[in-house]
Image (tube, helix red, strand yellow):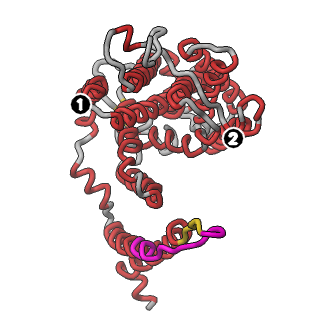
Amino acid sequence: MADFLNTRVGAALKDAVLAAVVTLLLTSIMVGIKTKTEQGGLGIEGNWSLVAWMVLAVLVGRFAMSLLVWRGRNPVANAMQSILPKQETVGKIGKFVGPALLVFALTLPFYGNRYVIDMGILVLTYIMLGWGLNIVVGLAGLLDLGYVAFYAVGAYSYALFAQYFDLSFWVCLPLAGILASFWGMILGFPVLRLRGDYLAIVTLAFGEIIRVVLLNWYEFTGGPDGISRIPRPSFFGLEFERKGGFADFFGIPYDSMHRVIFLFYLILALALLTNFVTMRMRKLPIGRAWEALREDEIACRSLGINTTNTKLTAFALGAMFGGFAGAFFATRQGFISPESFTFMESAIILAIVVLGGLGSQLGVVVASIVMIGGFEVFRDLQDLRMLVFGLLMVVIMIWKPRGIISSRAPSVFLKEKKAVSGDFVAEGEG
């Protein structure tokens, strides 16, 4: 028996059985046991057939993968590398994909129905959040797990200003961004000497502190009840109402889709503004300082770069765009509560940035479309939604550990502007 376990097949079988046992323990809790409402209280029902199929799939898949890895192969990476183009080709394709996606977004309201446009608004919101976090994580290399705090600050800033001071959306939008940027600097000061995992823990705690404050400060924020009847934005003072509004001014029949289309183009404009500012800042000295900080902070200091100001500007600018997105979220929903700004939101935004490719603007767009739009397919499968999400993340990390688009176009070049692969950067350094 001992001799068999030392063989290639025996070691693979041992590894597969261990993975199957771990799967059995996890799925028994998450999938096998469910509570249901019954007369007189809660009851428990089992779904052990699904658990058995999942354990069997892991057993067979891990056994096959272990055999191939034993031979020095990576089946997922090899299969994907043979199908997908190289990084140089991806960079050339990206020049056409970006404008094509922009044209698609601009024309979507003309042929999309209500559901498609609402989904487009949601995807664009996460694209804007991903681009904002990309400044902090992708360009400056600062791991932020509390980005949803700035999202919440922007949403509550607009809601409270509109409720207590009767200010319009267009007045509150810059105020929400300024306040979120201010809180970004407040977060930046205590963590200037932290990096890596320690920085991630502190930012995670900051996000939870903001959520707990919003949850318990009932007199000011409404606590768990949230804030309702948040005013909607107007089109240059024209409200989207049945009488005396946008439709009557332009002499067209009233349609409730007018407001939805206006919100779609509003978030599209905000997202494009985020992208434009990010790309322009990347070419400026402060943008190059961000990238120098990401690659090597010690070398960055030796060059005379003020790392304090560099980190604070990254936190402040990224937080500002998070505040803009939060203000839009509040006016679109008309209701906000602390439950909308949990850690899971931060995790999803960070996953979009990491899976898309750190520092890649187009990668954030692709990852947002796949993660937010694509997962609508699993809306009816609530039990399996997060399991599929985790499985896809594992596959992506095996296949492309640097993200879907890992190439980086240099902001400064001598003769030729040639994209650089993220593989040249050490693990954990951005």
Q: Secondary structure at mark 1?
A: helix
Pick the front one: 400 or 59: 59
Name the amino acid type tagged 1: Lys
Question: Foreground residue, 90 or 430?
Answer: 90
* Residue 224 circle label: 2
130 lies left or right of 367: right
Residue 260 numbered mark, or none: none
| Amino acid type, residue under disc 2 in the picture | Pro
Coordinates of residue 418 in the picture (x, y in percent): 30, 27
The circle drawn on residue 92 is 1
* x and y percentages locating residue 379 in the rendered image: 41, 51
Against 290, residue 236 (above or below) is above
40 in the magenta segment: yes
Evaluate whether residue 355 shows in this view: yes
The range drawn in magenta is 39-54
For the residues labelled 1 and 2, the Cα–Cα distance comes to 49 Å
Q: Position of residue 124 (x, y in %)?
A: 41, 31
Give the quarter of the image for residue 15: bottom left
* Lateral position of residue 188 relative to residue 109, left or right: right
Question: Which residue is at the far bottom?
Answer: 1
- Foreground pick, 251 / 194: 251
Q: Residue at point 69% right, 40% down? A: 224
Judged by depth in the image, the label closer to the viewer, 1 or 2, is 2
CB contact under 8 Å: marks 1 and 2: no
Q: Residues within 10 Å of mark 1 (few under 14, many from 20)?
A: few
